[in-house]
Amino acid sequence: MASAAPAVSINLFDPAVQHCPYDAYKTLRDEAPAYQQPGTDIFIVTRYDDVRRVLMDPETFPSGSSGTAYRMKTGNVERQKRVADRFSAKGWVPEPTLGSRDDPGHKQMRAMFNEAFKPSRIKEIDPSVEALADELIDGFIDDGHCDWVSQFAVPLPLYIIGEQMGMPRTDMWQIKRWTDAFFHRISMMLPEELEMEMVDREIEAQHYFQPIFDRLRKEPDDSLISVLVNTVIEGWGRTLTNEELHAEMMADTFVGGSETTTNALAAGMKLLIENKQVWHQLKSDPDRYMKTFVEEVLRLESPVQSLMRFCSKDTEIGGVPVPNGALINVRFAAANRDDRAFDCPEKLDLERPKAGSHMAFGSGIHHCLGAPLARRELIWGFTAVVDRFEDMAFAPGKNDFAVHPHFLLRSLKALHIEFEPKRVEGSLSVGE
């Protein structure tokens, strides 16, 4: 089936477009709702209803290529083999992660994660998240300024997922270095030399985690990593292999459990500084507005901009022919600003009805299992901002608002802010 020639020309691999992609998304929604990225087999889907259709139809649009006519037509096949060979020679070749599996294996594996990340268990960690948010702010409150990304947005979810996994806090920045390697490797933006450097860092992580797996098999504890190591998956009749565990350490636990929340914490602070009327409204009644604010941050600045699916048969999306074997890039971030689904989609609206109807966490069988944890961390993170800051501003001359080059995720490199600590009622100012 031949695809229709696009009337527009947009390159979502261009770092300049990634810096602020929202005009490009609007053009694609309006003029090319299933846009084949030139030079690739990738069809980019941008309208809300089309994205939802892809996510809700895993038979037509599976997460893996089995049963499709997909054949990578570039030199990346050889490059992927070299990556696998490097893992094999020095460590363990990661198996497909939860997010890249289809049923029945996906459903069986996810049952274990659903138990580990169930909302009731997540709510139990509220006191830890609240205390950590205050502890982090205590570390820089007297300075009157900080890099919000490195001093708050990164450590808050990083330390929490580390605690859940049973990792000592002293090791978490080293683990962050390793998971950053995975983050950059999946960006689809690296030259081969840099990709291999990231692979070597991941292999370092594998040799850190492997003795932990071995110990927990002999001496289980109550950590989340022990659950992953020792749970016999119903339908499989076995626990996860080392290769499966190493894949999960990078993708669905430490990156999935921290990176996306980091990006939302950073984006939310930027939005508050840019929308002072919203900041004042949020401060006026946080109990009323906080949950909606969090949902609006997730909708407007989707931390996961997109993920991939495959096409298992000739079909159409948005009236555009899409052939069996195509790669489908579902652009959550574009769907979340679709004026067909949201009134005034560019507006940060604390009165927005059904604010949680966005797709920042996906939809369907692969809906993000860490969504309850992310929402709790965002609520407590921004609650600490309301409680501790009178006002905030961008630090003059220190921000370029650059994002890491990435085809799938959106991540601010840094956010330098200045702030006025919240005044305690009855306290005296200097000179009074």
Image: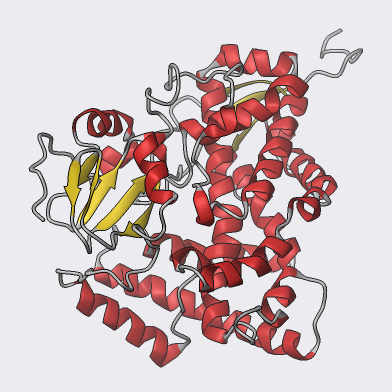
Residue 167 seen by the camera? no
What residue lies at 60% left-to-right and 82% top-to-bottom? 240
Foreground pick, 172 / 395: 172
Q: Position of residue 306 (x, y in %)?
A: 39, 48
Q: Position of residue 279 (x, y in %)?
A: 62, 18
The quadrant of the rendering that contains the N terminus is bottom left
In the image, residue 293 sits, relative to residue 102, either above or below, namely above
What residue lies at 23% left-to-right and 54% top-to-bottom? 42
What residue lies at 21% left-to-right and 79% top-to-bottom? 78
Q: Is residue 303 left or right of residue 123?
A: left
In the image, residue 9 sits, relative to residue 365, either above or below, namely above
Q: Is residue 413 left or right of residue 20?
A: right
What residue lies at 61% left-to-right and 56% top-to-bottom? 257
The quadrant of the rendering that contains the C terminus is top right
Q: Position of residue 25 (x, y in %)?
A: 29, 34
Q: Is residue 391 left or right of residue 275?
A: right
Residue closest to the far right: 426
In the image, residue 321 sits, relative to residue 73, either above or below, namely above
Quadrant of the rendered image containing residue 59: bottom left
Q: Position of residue 122 (x, y in %)?
A: 76, 52
Residue closest to the far top: 432
Colour scheme in the image?
A: secondary structure
Foreground pick, 5 / 379: 5
Residue 103 seen by the camera? yes
Total marks shown come to 0
In the image, residue 358 sits, relative to residue 92, either above or below, namely above
